[in-house]
Image (tube, rainbow, N blue to C red):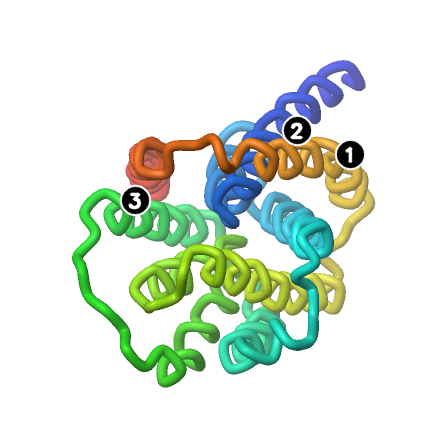
Amino acid sequence: MAGAMIDVLILAGITLFFSALIKGISGFGTAIFAVPLLTAFFFPPGEVRVMVVTLNLLLNFFILFSENRLTKANANQMKGLMLPGFIFALVSGFFLVQVDDRLFTVTLGILLIVTALNKLFKIPFSIHHPGRYFIPVGSLSGVLNTLVGVGGVPVLIFLSNTAYQKNDFRKTIMLFFLAINTGSVLTFMIQGAYTQSILIQTLSMIPFVLLGSFTGMKIAGYINNLRFNQLIALLLLIMGVANLFNGA
């Protein structure tokens, strides 16, 4: 029994390594890849949600601190997006019990497919005054982060259609994820979601995600962004369709 559990943790760690690798390259990826894969093969949705959000929070600190981007000035620029995200990530924790495995799986499938289609068939439009939409976009992302563990989809699509440059986009998305993951972790603590087994599983995954993130950051400059995003989109589309079938 113990040997089987160790095997599961190692395979889950490898999954998280590659998910964190993608995050190190692009600024996102841990949740949107790790959540469907971990729920499909290793752990129940409720455990995965708590584990991935917690690991993401650690990664947010690691990446922002290592790149010297964790500053008050940077946060002030996006507080209109970060504050509603944090608040709704925190408050939505009171509805965790209403999200059963079927609703979780279907919602996750929809989010994966929307993200894939956005990357594959991006409809060109520009949001000229993004500040007007910070509250609804941030709020929706916060809710999805706590209830499903994948809160980045609305804000990723939103920011990709603004005038932000690539570096500004990456900085913004990382700071926003820091805010919503903090809110989600706090509500998990309030709701008593951190059981002993989840804590052990989460702690055992930290080396995998840190190594994956560090590796991704190192090789980011050598990646063909167009091909990389196309591959990401195809994988997301496959996982999204699979989740919809499983939840039907």
Q: Distance from label 2 to label 1 (Cα)?
A: 8 Å
Q: Quadrant of the C terminus?
A: top left
Q: Is residue 17 above or below residue 107?
A: above
Q: Quadrant of the N terminus?
A: top right
Is the residue marked by circle 2 packed among few (<14), some (14-19), or many (20+) residues within 10 Å? many
- The residue to which callout 1 is attached is 204
Q: Earlier in the sequence, mark 1 or mark 3?
A: 3
Residue 110 image point, x, y percent: 32, 51
- The residue to which callout 2 is attached is 13
Is disc 3 placed on a helix, strand or loop? helix
At horizontal 55% and vertical 78% (from top left) the residue drawn is 77
Q: Earlier in the sequence, mark 2 or mark 3?
A: 2
Q: Distance from label 1 to label 3 (Cα)?
A: 30 Å
The answer to whether any part of residue 50 appears in the image is no
At horizontal 44% and vertical 32% (from top left) the residue drawn is 223
Is disc 2 placed on a helix, strand or loop? helix
Mark 2 vs 1: CB contact within 8 A? yes
Q: Amino acid at mark 2?
A: Gly
**Viewer-side residue, 42 vs 68:** 68
- The residue to which callout 3 is attached is 116
Q: Amino acid at mark 1?
A: Ser
Q: Distance from label 2 to label 3 (Cα)?
A: 24 Å
